[in-house]
Image: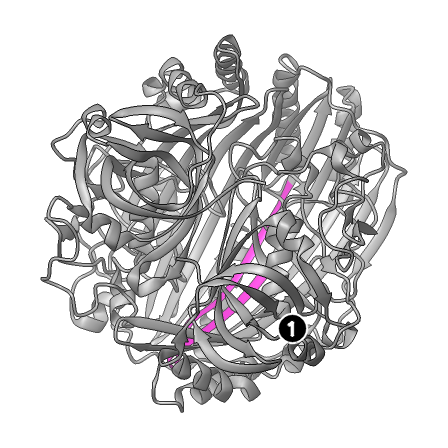
C-alpha cells in the first residue's frame, strides 16, 4: 500500500506538470491473493502486487487516456507526453463539457486491517477446514478463497482530491457428489465476518437431494434466491439503468420515466454509501456517490450519470464514473433491491408447483430493450410441490424478459444478501449487489440440460 | 535483466524446488473507438511486470509484481515459494510435472506493417470516415468504428534451462450500426460483432478488412432488420456462416475439450465439461464431416504463438477426426493422464496471471461443399450470420445462440430476412447433425479476443478457422 499522503502527492505532481487544459490522474494499487481448490488439492494459489496510473488529459474538448504501471518519474512523464500527443491529433468532442469539480467526499471505513492476517498458511488452514467439513458430509469441495487490499486515489486539475483504501475477501464453495452440486458464497471487507460452517451447511444442503429428475421446459412459478436475483439486477444495470443507454435511445427506460414498468413491490436502487452493501464513497472520477433510485414501487425514476453524460444534459454526476476510458456508460455497481415482507420459507410454502433456483450461469442478452436474457440454472435447482422443496431437477435454460419477470413478482423476502461475482478481470475492485429472494408467478424455461 | 532472471533460477535451485519458471511480460495496447462522429476512446496502455511459478514438494505457488528490481524479484520468488510450501502440506497427490527439453529460442509474429508505427492520423481517418459512412443512412442512431493493436513482449526462463523470448503483435478493427425504433434495437456489424475481427498480423490485416467499403451495407441491413419478420419458431435445417460457427466451435468444442475443466479445476467458476478423459478415442462427438484441429502454428491466427507459457513449442494436433474425439487440450501437468505429452496450450493473460490450458486456434477443417450448393440443396431452413448472444451451461451441454441477422431458405434459395434469430441445442446431438461443411474457398480465421476463464479472471486471445456448415433438425426461434 502506498498510503494516502504519498498517493495524493504523486498524483498532484503529475497534475502540476501537465500542460493540458484539464488533467485527471487515477491511481489504483492492489495487493491480493487467491487460492482455488478442488477435492484433490489447492491447485492454484497466486499473489499479486500491482500499481496502475491512469491519466486523462483534456485539450479543449479533445480527450485522451494513457494507462501505465511503470511508475518511475521518467516513465510517468513519458506517459503524460503520450497522452498529450494523443489528445492533440484528434478532432474535438463537442459534447464534452468538463471533468468534475471537487465535492466533499463522505468518510467511510472500507478497510479492515484484519485482512492482513490472511497469510498463505492461514488461507490453507481455512480451506483445509472447508474441505474436511464438506467431506464429513459425504461430498467433495471446490472453490476459491481470495483477499485483497486495494487503494484508489483521484486528483484532477479542478481540485478533486480523493483517496480510499479497501479490503475485500470472498469465498465461494461448491459441494458436490456424482448426483449434484450445491453453491454457497461469502463476500465482505471484514475477515471477522467469515464463518465457514454456515457456508458449508448451505452448499451441502443444496447438493443433498439425490438423483435429479427432469422437468420439461415451460412457464413455472419460481423462487429465485438472491444470487439469481443478482444476475437480473446486474443485467438491468448494464442494459438500461444508466444515462448513456438512455441518451443513445437503447435503454428500456426510454420514454417510460414516471410510468409503472414492474410490480409495485419492486424498488431497485444504487447506493455506494449504504453500509449493508460493500461501501464505495466516490467513483473513479473522485465524485461522491449518490443514491439513485431506478424503480420506486415499480415506477421508472432515474438513471446514473458520470461527468460526461451529466455534462450532455446540464446535470451533475451522480458519482458513477467508471475507470476511463469507459465506453459502456456509468453502469451502477452498488445495486440494491429493497426487501419485502415475506420470509423465504413462507414463499416456498405458498408455491403449489414450481421451481426453486439457487443461481444462474452464463446469462446473456437476447433482446436488449425488452431486457430479455437467457441463461442456465446451476448448483441447486429444485422442484417445489405443495409448498415443499422436493427433488433436485436437471439444470434448465431460461429465456425471459427481466421486466416481465419483475412485473410478476408475488413476494419478496425480508432477508437480503450481499452477492458478488467474486471474479476479478483486470484491475481488482470487488463490488456487491444486495438482493432478496423473490417469488415470480410465471418464469419461462426454454430448455433442459440433458445428454 | 538476464542477471536478475538467473539469480531467481539459482535461488530456486537453492530452495530445491521441483521446478520454477519466470515470465517477464510487457504489453502495449492501443485502442481507438469512434461513436457517432466523436472519438469515444483513444487510449494507450502499458503493462509491465513479472510472474514466478514454483513447484515445491508437489504443490504450486505463484506470485507476481509490477515493481521491476532485483530485490523485488527475490521477495516475489520467496512469496511464491512460501505459497507452494503451504499448499504442499495439504496436497493429496503430488502434482506430476514431466520434464521437457530446454528450449532457447526467439519468436516474432511475422508482420509487414507494424500497427504501432502507423500514424494515428491514418487510423483516425479510416475510423472517422467509416463511422460517417454508416451515418449517411439517416435511420441509423448509433454508428461505431473500432480499432486496436497489441504488442506483447515476453521472456520466459525455467529451471530446466529454457530461455525463450517472444514478441507477439495482434490487431483488428470493425464497424457497427444500430437502428432503433419503437422499443427495438437492431445492430449489424462487420467483419464480426463485438468490435471486429482480430489476427496476429500487422496493419496490413486492418487494410485488408476494408471496413469503409462495408459501412453502407451494414447500415442498410440494420435499418431493414427493424421491419423484418421475426425469426420463426420450430425445428428446421440451419446453415451458420463462418463467424457464428466460430463461436459455436469456441463454446461447444473449444471449452469442453480443455482437460483442466474436465478434471474439475474450473468447477467453482467457469464450470466443468460433459467429457471424461476415458472418452478420448471412443466418443462420437460429431458427424463424419466434423474434423477439428488445435493449431497454434496457423499463420495469422489470433491463437498463434511460438511457445506456450510452459516453454513448449506451438503445435498442430487433431482433436476430432471424422467426428471421433481423439485428443484434448492439455498441459505438462495434465497430459500424462491421457498417456500423452502436452500439446502446448498453457497460456497466461499477462505477467500477473498463472498459465492455464487455453484454446489456441481451434479450427473446423474445411469440407467439400460450396455455400451456394449447401443452400441450393436445402428445401427449407434458416441461414444465420454474426453472433449477437451466447450462453451455455456449466458442463457445456445445452447452448443457445442469437445472431444479428438471418434469412429464410425456401426451395433451395435465400428468402426473407428475419430478425432476432436464436437457436438452441445439445452439444453432441448438434455436432452429429452436421451434414455439410463448406470448402476452403469459404474458410477463414476468426479471432476471439475476449475468451474468459480462471480466477483471478483471465482473458485469452484465441482463433477459430471455420467455413459455413449445415445442421439438421435444430430448434430455432427459441421461446
* Residue B224: % across, % down: 41, 83
Colour setup of the view: one colour
User: What residue is at 74 percent from the left and 55 percent from the top?
Assistant: B287
How many numbered callouts? 1
> Up-down: is B40 above or below A207?
below
* Residue B193: % across, % down: 51, 68
Give the chain letter at badge 1: B
User: What residue is at 54 percent from the left and 85 percent from the top?
Assistant: B214
Residue placed furthest toward the right:
B101
Let me know if residue B35 is in the magenta part.
yes
Nearest the camera: A295 or B58?
Answer: A295
Q: Where does the magenta region start and end? A: B29-50
Let me know if residue A210 is in the magenta part.
no
Q: Is residue A117 visible?
A: yes
Nearest the camera: A249 or A397?
Answer: A397
Residue placed furthest toward the top:
A136
* Residue A210: % across, % down: 48, 20
> Up-down: is A427 above or below A176?
below
* Left or right of A198 in this view: B272: right
User: What residue is at 48 percent from the left and 33 percent from the top?
Assistant: A32
* Left or right of A142 in this view: B112: right
- Label 1, on which residue? B115
* Residue A446: % across, % down: 41, 50
User: What residue is at 87 percent from the left and 36 percent from the top?
Assistant: B100
Q: Quadrant of the C terminus of chain B?
A: bottom left
Q: Is residue A105 visible?
A: no
Q: Quadrant of the N terminus of chain B?
A: top right
Judged by its main secondary structure, the magenta piece is: strand
Residue B290 occupies quadrant = bottom right
Residue B212 occupies quadrant = bottom right
Nearest the camera: B396 or B51?
Answer: B396
Amino acid at each position: 500500500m502506498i498510503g494516502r499522503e504519498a498517493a495524493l502527492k504523486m498524483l498532484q505532481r503529475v497534475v502540476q506538470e501537465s500542460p493540458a487544459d484539464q488533467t485527471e490522474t487515477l491511481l489504483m494499487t492492489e495487493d491480493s491473493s487467491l487460492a482455488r481448490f478442488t477435492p484433490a488439492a489447492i491447485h492454484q494459489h497466486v499473489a499479486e502486487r500491482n500499481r496502475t496510473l491512469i491519466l486523462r488529459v483534456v485539450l479543449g474538448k479533445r480527450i485522451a487516456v494513457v494507462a501505465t504501471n511503470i511508475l518511475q518519474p521518467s516513465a510517468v512523464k513519458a506517459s503524460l507526453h503520450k497522452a498529450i500527443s494523443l489528445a492533440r491529433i484528434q478532432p474535438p468532442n463537442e459534447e464534452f463539457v468538463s471533468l468534475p469539480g471537487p465535492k466533499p467526499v463522505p468518510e467511510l471505513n472500507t478497510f479492515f486491517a484484519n485482512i492482513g492476517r490472511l497469510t498463505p498458511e492461514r488461507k490453507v488452514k481455512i480451506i483445509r477446514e472447508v474441505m474436511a467439513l464438506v467431506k464429513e458430509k459425504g461430498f467433495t469441495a471446490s472453490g476459491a478463497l481470495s483477499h485483497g487490499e486495494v487503494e484508489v486515489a483521484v486528483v484532477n486539475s479542478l481540485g478533486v482530491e480523493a483517496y480510499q483504501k479497501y479490503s475485500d475477501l470472498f469465498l465461494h464453495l461448491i459441494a458436490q457428489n456424482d448426483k449434484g452440486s450445491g453453491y454457497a458464497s461469502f463476500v465482505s471487507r471484514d475477515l471477522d465476518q467469515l464463518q465457514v460452517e454456515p457456508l458449508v451447511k448451505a452448499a451441502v444442503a443444496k447438493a443433498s437431494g439425490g438423483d435429479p429428475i427432469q422437468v420439461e421446459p415451460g412457464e413455472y412459478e419460481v423462487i429465485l434466491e438472491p444470487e439469481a436475483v443478482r444476475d437480473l439486477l446486474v443485467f438491468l444495470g448494464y442494459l438500461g439503468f444508466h444515462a448513456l443507454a438512455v441518451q443513445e435511445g437503447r435503454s428500456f427506460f426510454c420514454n417510460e420515466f414516471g410510468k409503472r414498468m414492474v410490480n409495485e413491490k419492486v424498488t431497485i436502487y444504487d447506493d455506494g454509501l449504504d453500509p449493508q452493501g460493500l461501501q464505495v464513497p466516490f467513483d473513479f472520477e473522485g465524485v461522491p456517490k449518490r443514491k439513485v433510485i431506478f424503480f420506486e414501487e415499480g415506477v421508472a425514476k432515474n438513471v446514473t450519470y458520470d461527468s460526461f453524460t451529466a455534462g450532455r444534459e446540464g446535470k451533475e454526476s451522480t458519482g458513477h464514473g467508471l475507470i476511463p476510458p469507459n465506453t459502456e456508460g456509468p453502469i451502477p455497481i452498488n445495486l440494491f433491491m429493497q426487501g419485502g415482507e415475506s420470509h423465504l420459507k413462507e414463499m416456498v410454502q405458498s408455491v403449489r408447483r414450481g421451481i426453486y433456483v439457487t443461481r444462474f450461469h452464463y446469462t446473456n442478452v437476447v433482446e436488449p430493450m425488452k431486457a430479455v436474457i437467457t441463461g442456465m440454472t446451476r448448483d441447486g435447482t429444485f422442484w417445489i410441490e405443495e409448498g415443499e422443496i422436493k427433488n433436485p431437477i436437471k439444470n434448465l435454460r431460461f429465456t425471459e424478459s427481466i421486466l416481465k419477470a419483475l412485473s410478476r413478482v408475488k413476494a419478496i423476502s425480508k432477508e437480503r444478501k450481499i452477492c458478488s461475482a467474486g471474479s476479478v478481470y483486470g484491475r481488482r475492485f470487488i463490488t456487491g449487489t444486495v438482493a432478496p429472494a423473490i417469488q415470480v408467478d410465471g418464469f419461462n424455461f426454454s430448455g433442459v440440460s440433458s445428454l | 535483466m538476464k542477471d536478475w532472471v538467473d539469480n531467481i533460477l539459482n535461488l530456486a535451485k537453492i530452495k530445491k524446488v521441483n521446478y520454477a519458471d519466470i515470465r517477464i511480460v510487457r504489453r502495449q495496447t492501443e485502442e481507438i473507438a469512434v461513436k457517432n462522429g466523436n472519438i469515444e476512446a483513444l487510449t494507450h496502455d502499458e503493462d509491465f511486470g513479472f510472474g514466478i511459478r514454483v513447484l515445491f514438494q508437489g504443490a504450486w505457488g505463484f506470485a507476481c509484481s509490477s515493481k521491476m528490481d532485483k530485490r523485488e524479484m527475490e521477495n516475489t520468488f520467496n512469496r511464491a515459494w512460501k505459497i507452494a510450501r503451504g499448499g504442499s502440506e495439504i496436497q493429496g497427490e503430488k502434482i506430476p510435472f514431466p520434464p521437457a527439453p530446454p528450449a532457447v529460442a526467439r519468436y516474432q509474429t511475422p508482420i509487414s506493417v507494424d500497427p504501432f508505427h502507423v500514424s494515428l492520423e491514418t487510423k483516425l481517418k479510416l475510423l472517422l470516415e467509416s463511422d460517417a459512412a454508416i451515418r449517411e443512412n439517416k435511420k441509423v442512431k448509433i454508428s461505431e468504428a473500432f480499432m486496436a493493436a497489441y504488442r506483447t513482449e515476453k521472456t520466459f526462463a525455467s529451471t530446466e534451462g529454457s530461455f525463450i523470448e517472444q514478441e507477439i503483435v495482434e490487431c483488428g478493427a470493425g464497424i457497427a450500426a444500430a437502428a432503433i425504433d419503437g422499443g427495438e434495437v437492431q445492430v449489424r456489424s462487420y467483419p464480426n460483432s463485438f468490435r471486429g475481427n482480430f489476427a496476429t498480423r500487422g496493419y496490413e490485416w486492418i487494410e485488408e478488412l476494408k471496413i469503409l467499403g462495408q459501412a453502407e451495407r451494414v447500415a442498410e441491413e440494420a435499418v431493414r432488420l427493424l421491419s423484418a419478420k421475426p425469426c420463426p419458431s420450430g425445428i428446421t435445417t440451419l446453415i451458420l456462416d463462418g463467424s457464428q460457427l466460430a463461436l459455436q466451435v469456441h463454446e461447444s468444442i473449444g471449452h469442453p475439450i480443455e482437460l483442466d475443466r474436465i478434471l474439475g479445476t474450473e468447477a467453482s467458476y467457469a464450470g466443468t465439461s460433459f467429457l471424461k478423459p476415458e472418452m478420448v478415442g471412443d466418443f462420437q462427438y460429431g458427424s463424419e464431416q466434423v474434423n477439428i484441429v488445435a493449431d497454434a502454428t496457423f499463420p495469422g491466427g489470433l491463437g498463434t504463438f511460438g511457445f506456450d507459457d510452459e516453454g513448449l513449442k506451438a503445435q498442430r494436433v487433431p482433436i476430432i477426426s471424422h467426428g471421433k474425439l481423439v485428443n484434448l487440450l492439455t498441459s505438462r501437468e495434465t497430459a500424462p493422464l491421457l498417456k500423452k505429452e502436452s500439446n502446448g496450450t498453457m497460456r497466461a493473460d499477462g505477467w500477473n496471471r498463472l498459465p492455464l490450458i487455453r484454446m489456441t486456434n481451434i479450427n473446423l477443417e474445411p469440407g467439400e461443399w460450396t455455400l451456394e450448393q449447401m443452400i441450393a440443396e436445402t428445401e427449407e431452413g434458416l441461414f444465420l450470420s454474426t453472433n449477437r448472444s451466447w450462453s451455455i451451461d456449466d458442463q457445456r451441454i445445452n447452448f443457445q445462440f442469437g445472431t444479428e441477422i438471418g434469412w429464410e431458405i425456401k426451395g433451395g434459395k435465400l428468402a426473407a430476412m428475419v430478425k432476432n434469430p436464436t437457436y438452441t441445442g445439445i452439444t453432441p446431438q448438434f455436432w452429429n447433425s452436421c451434414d455439410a461443411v463448406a470448402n476452403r474457398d469459404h474458410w477463414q480465421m476468426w479471432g476471439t479476443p475476449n475468451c474468459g476463464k480462471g480466477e483471478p479472471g483471465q482473458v485469452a486471445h484465441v482463433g477459430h478457422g471455420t467455413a459455413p456448415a449445415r445442421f439438421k433438425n435444430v430448434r430455432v426461434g427459441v421461446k
